[in-house]
Each structure stands twice: as structure tokens, then as C-alpha cells.
Image (tube, rainbow, N blue to C red):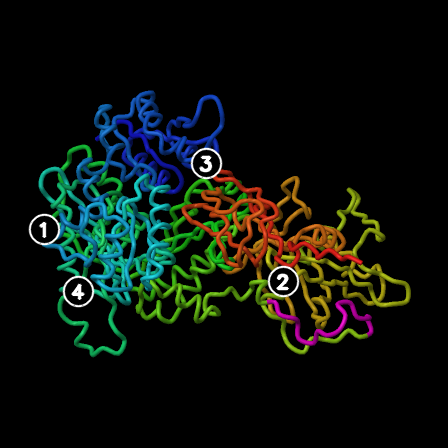
Amino acid sequence: MFDTVLVANRGEIALRVIRTLRRLGVRSVAVFSDADADAPHVREADVAVRLGPADRSDSSAAETYLRTDQILTAARRTGAQAVHPGYGFLAENPGFARACADAGLVFIGPPPGAVELMGDKINAKEAVRTAGVPVVPGSQATAPTDEELVAAADEIGYPVLLKPSAGGGGKGMRLVRDRADLPTEIAAARRVARTAFGDDTLLLERWVDRPRHIEVQVLADAHGTTVHLGERECSLQRRHQKLIEEAPSVLLNAETRAAMGAAAVRAAESCGYTGAGTVEFIVPGIDPDAPASAAEGVRDFFFMEMNTRLQVEHPVTELAVAVGPDSARLDLVEWQLRVAAGEPLAFAQSDISFLGHAIEARICAEDPERDFLPTGGRILTLDEPRGEGIRVDSGVTPGTVVTSAYDPMLAKVIAYGPDRPTALRRLRAALADTRILGVTTNTGFLRRLLAHPEVVAGRLDTGLVEQTAQQQPALLTAPYSPSNAAAPAGAAGSAHPADEADTAAAEPPSPAHLLYYAAALARHLELIPTADPGGWTDPFSLLSGWRLGGTPAWTTHRLRTPGQDPVSVRIRSITAGNVTDPTDNSAGLTREVELRLDAGPVHRARATLAGDRLHLTVDGLQTAFALATDTTPGLAAGPVTWLGVEGDAWPLHAYDPVIESAAGAAAHHGALTAPMPGTVTVVKTTAGETVRKGQPLLVLEAMKMEHVIAAPHDGVVAELRAAAGATVAMEDLLVVVTPAEEAAEPAEVRS
């Protein structure tokens, strides 16, 4: 075994590897960019080395985690004997693997030749085809031209799937259903491939209807033994990015499982593979109307690609696969290390079996309510779930600043159970107990996805998530989302009717209204004065709303959430008409009040603040919200209130109608701002150009995702502030398109 290993990665995978190294008594070396100087993987390692230019701060991956020379220098400085690449960055770069060998370092992964062969999807398909592994029909040329790709599509028929030959992780993949769209999609796929992988070679494959993405974990030593560790179902995806993975797959019968496992072993052996790797297959889904006999025997499956590294979803295999008579669990990172150190596998294929079921959910910094655009910010609160059968692999802590420079995945929550229903229930509960405030994530969305009837039944395919989002969006929408906050029942007329028109609530408020109530009460409680050392509080500083000879006055809190109209929540204390009533002057952070959203009915409520939890009881129903306040200096509207419930979280901002009105009057309605923080990769227009509605103007990239900024209407580009390669923050002004009718010169009037 090695004495010192350098981990050439960051985030949760770096932490995952470092913890196994510590368990084995191996000294760990971390590397970091300036942005990651205080990251958890840096603090966890025995020693850490900075990456990046010596004369300036540049945390981009190209100047840090992708710098082979700097990583090798770090290994020499620290006496590392081996390098673990994790996944992503240089993990599947054959040049990096060779550079490690040339520097006298062990690359903890397969031989460079295997990385190179399987990294070239075109040659990989030919290699496994020769080894007897079934492949999807598609283009045959090594580096097909655009014309050859079009010809291949015409030959195999539509729909087809475009894939970067050198890529992985779904980046650059394009599903094309119409021949007329193929040239445009080829150009887009080449651009992404060139940016992400430095190689714009594409391949084209037939699209399999109702496809299921099922992969097989393989493990091979340098002594001629290769085994498979069963399959993982990865069909729940969005834009070819995996969301949920589980093991075993509910689709496969014993015959198909054995056949796929044997095919995966042949694929690994065809390239001289050693270490841990994954062979991915596409499996046609079962037609719901097909007879039961269709599920019998060996099902069709087709080789898709081989990932020559550890996979993000490897924990489900570690939890669900048992080895030997004592049903021991495997640590795949440990076996990567042992194989790289020359040890033989200590078990055979006959020793391996499934025992129980495991499911993993990937928590990412993205906003499901804004088409999953990348997000960012500083994590204010982080509560990770615990409990029987729950595992969390995380790369963040409270205070971590999430930027657009790296992958959006923050953590993985994995649940194990004796059977699939138990694992599903445990994972849904764990996601509900996951609280991340300060950065919008997909946690709540994943929880709702796991409750989808088709997911519960195991009827999965790679298009299910996007189909549901289009056809049944309510299934995936958060009940507490401000987007669900329709006008309250009973609301009519002015937003501020006279007090005497107050009406009692006829029905309970919606969950979305509760979110606004909680935000207003959180701000309200912050305004309560503290007592002096003697216990006395100035009664005139209290928010009692006391008025001589009348009911208490309302205190109005105006709030807004991104993308939604502002609302007003009015609060008044419940009193017996006397300002000295204990309810008014209680020293604790519990208040009994009446609430009113805009012109809606009045609700009676009780709010208790206990640490970072706000317990809100409205009309007898109590809801507990996680609470945090972002007090970062420079926030335009002041402190931001973050509330979380059932895995979801939202920022609520104070709203000043005077300031907003002035800003709105100054802003041009043709102004296009950045919907996410990122980098401008392509600018397709110039100032003064006449454009049509929907015409692409520029492309913004963040966290491996492209977003096209298009003209909102016919008009003229009056202002262009974006430049290719520029980094922009969310809501930065990019371009202004003056509507055609405003851009036209008025006709000259002559007398």
C-alpha cells in the first residue's frame, strides 16, 4: 500500500477519497484553487497545495484543477507516490495518466491505453463490438464530417442522438427528431464538445424508444481477474444529467442481469482494464401494454459507453452489494487503491450478490422553478439528514460560497433498505430533513420526484422527468412555492381596505401563503426590542400597534421573491385593549397575532422562534420552517430572509414600492439580464443590428450548462455589454433590444 496519495480533485469526491485514505492509514494530499482555500476537502487532508497562477488569483478549472504540470509539482513537493483523480477534471484524460507514469507516480485508475480507447466513443464501440458486446446502430466513421453524420442519420432513421466522442456526463448530447434540425444541433454539439473536452468529434446513434439507462460496475486487478458488481439504474435524468440512481434495477430479471454483467466484463477485458470502471447500457423499456411474457428471458441491451473512473453513484453499489458468506460490503475507493498497489482481488464473481436496495439523490445548486438554471451564493444553514440506512457524501459546510466555476453538485444523499419501498421512504424522509439555506437547490424537487407514481412503481425511462415537467408540472411543484400564491380567498378591491372591513378566514391559508406569513413574522420578531438588564422594556418601542380607544394598528411587511409579484403581509397583536397585556409585552420570542395577506381574510396565528426554527401556527395548523438571514453587506434591498421546509428553500426580500417604481421606470423593457452567474461563451450579434423575436443573441455557460439569450421581440440591438469570455453575475445587464416600433425614426412633418 502507498504511504502518501494526492487527490487531484475537489468537493465531495475529494472528501470521499481522503476519508478512505485516513481509514487505511495513508497520508492524504489535497489540491485547491483560491476559491477553495477554506473548502472542507482542504481542511480534511493531511496537507494541501495551492493551484493557480503565482502572480494573480484565477480559480478557473483551466488554471487549477486541469493543470497537469501543477498537480505533478504538488505531488513531488509532498512526496506522493500515487494520484487519485476522483471523477471529472482529469479523471478520464489519458495524457494525464501518462504524465503521472512518466513522473514516476501511480495513476489510480486504468492504464492510459484503456482510458484513451474507451474515451473515444467511436473506437470504443468497435472494440466492444469485436468482443461480442451488442452496440446501438449508428455512425461508423472515426471522425465523421457533418455530411457523414447527416448521411448516417438518413440511413438508420430518426430520431437520433448526437454525442461528443471524447465526452461524458451528458454534456453536448443532442436528441434530434427532425432532419431539418440536424445541422444546427451538430454545430451546437461540436461547440460544447470543443469547450468541454477540447475535441469536437461527434458520433451519432439511433435513439432507443422508452430508453432506460442501466450501467454495470466492474472491478479488475492486474492479475487477470475481472468481476462485475451488478447494475445501477440511472434512468431518472434531466438533459442527460443523472438525478437519481439505484441498485439493483427493478427492470432486470436474473437472465438479463447475468448477460449484462458478462457483457460488461468482456468490454473491460477488451481494453486491458484494471481498477474500478462502469459499462453503461441502453435498455429498451417495457411497453405497459405488452403481455407479461415480454419481461421473460434475456432482454435487449446495447453498449453505450464505458466510464474509466469511479462514478458519482458508486455509493449505491457499496450499500447494496454483499460479498462472501458474511455479506461484507465493499469500499470501492479502497479497492481502487489496492489494485493500483498491485494487490489481487480477494473475491470471485460467485462471491458477489445483491442484498437489499439502495437509492441515491444528487443535490445540486440549481433552481427547478427557473428551468433548473444554476444558482450560487453563500450557504447560511446546512443540516444534513441522519438516521437508519442514511448516508451523506457532501462537499460543503455552512459558510461555503457556491460559484459557477465548478460542477453544481453539492452533496449526495443515499438511503439503504432491505427492499426498494423501504429505501424510497427513507430517502424521501431524508431529503425532507435536508436543510440548505442561502443557495437554491433541487432538494425538494428530488423528494417529489421520488413520490411520482411511475417512480414508485419502477416504470422509469430517461424521458420521464422532462415529460412530467411538461405534462404534469403540479406533481413536481413545491406546495410552499411563492408561484402557487394565488390571491387569497376573499381578497378583493384595494390591498389595504379599512379595518372595519376585516373578515375572518373562511378556510385555511394555502402552504404558499404560510411561507409569506412566516417571512413577515420572522422580520416582525427581529424588530422586537430587548429588555434592559433590569428586565424593563420601553412600552413605546413595542410593536403592539396600540392605539387610544381603538383596535391595534396593522404593521405592514412588503415582501417579494424572485420572479413573483410583491405582496403585503399585515400583522397586528392580539390584545384585550390594554398595552400592558402580557401578550403584548412578553419577553420571549413567541407572539400571538392576526395576519392578513394583501386584501385576503384575517387569520389568527402564533409564532415561536427557537434558534434557527420558526414554528408558525395558523388556524390550528403548525408548520416548522428553517430560518436564516443573509446580512451580506451591499444587498440592494437589505437583509434577505431565507425559509426552508420539506427540503425546499426560498429567499424573501424586503420590497420598497417607491424604490422599485423608480428603478422600473429607469429600466428599458428590452433589457436582457443574466439569468444565472456564468461565462459568456458566444456573442452572435452586434450593436445596431436588426434582430427578430427569438433570434439567439449570445450564449451563457455555467456549471456545464449552456443557456441561450434570445431577442424578446423584433427590434434593434441598442446596447451590447457582453463580450465572449466575460464572466457575469446574476442579473447583470447583457444586451438591450429596442422594439422595432420604438427604433423606427418618426416621419418628418413638413408644412
**Residue 750: assigned label:** none
Pointers 4 and 3 in contact (CB under 8 A)? Answer: no
4 or 1: tag closer to the N-terminus: 1
The residue sitting at the front extreme is 751
Q: Earlier in the sequence, mark 3 or mark 2?
A: 3
Q: Residues within 10 Å of mark 3 (few under 14, many from 20)?
A: many
Q: Which residue is mark 1?
A: 131
Report the mark closest to the observer, 2 or 1.
1
Q: Which residue is mark 2?
A: 616
- Label 2 neighbour load within 10 Å: few <14, some 14-19, many 20+: many
**In this rendering, would 469 be left or right of 715?**
left
Residue drawn 20% across the image and 36% down it: 338
* Residue 39 numbered mark, or none: 3
Badge count: 4
- The boundaries of the magenta stretch are 485-500
**Which element type, helix, strand or loop, lies under badge 4?**
loop
Distance between the Cα atoms at labels 4 and 1? 17 Å
Q: CA distance from mark 3 to mark 2?
A: 35 Å
User: Image point 75% across, 76% down: which residue?
Assistant: 503
**In percent of the image, x 48 and y 47: which residue is there?**
684
Residue 80, picture quadrant? top left
Under circle 3, the secondary element is loop
Q: Secondary structure at mark 2?
A: strand
Between tags 3 and 1, which lies in front? 1
Amino acid found under the numbered disc labelled 4: Asp
Question: Circle 4 sits on which residue?
Answer: 300
- The quarter of the picture where residue 661 lies is bottom right
Does the image show residue 389?
Answer: no
Amino acid type at circle 3 is: Ala
Q: Is residue 404 above or below residue 28?
A: below
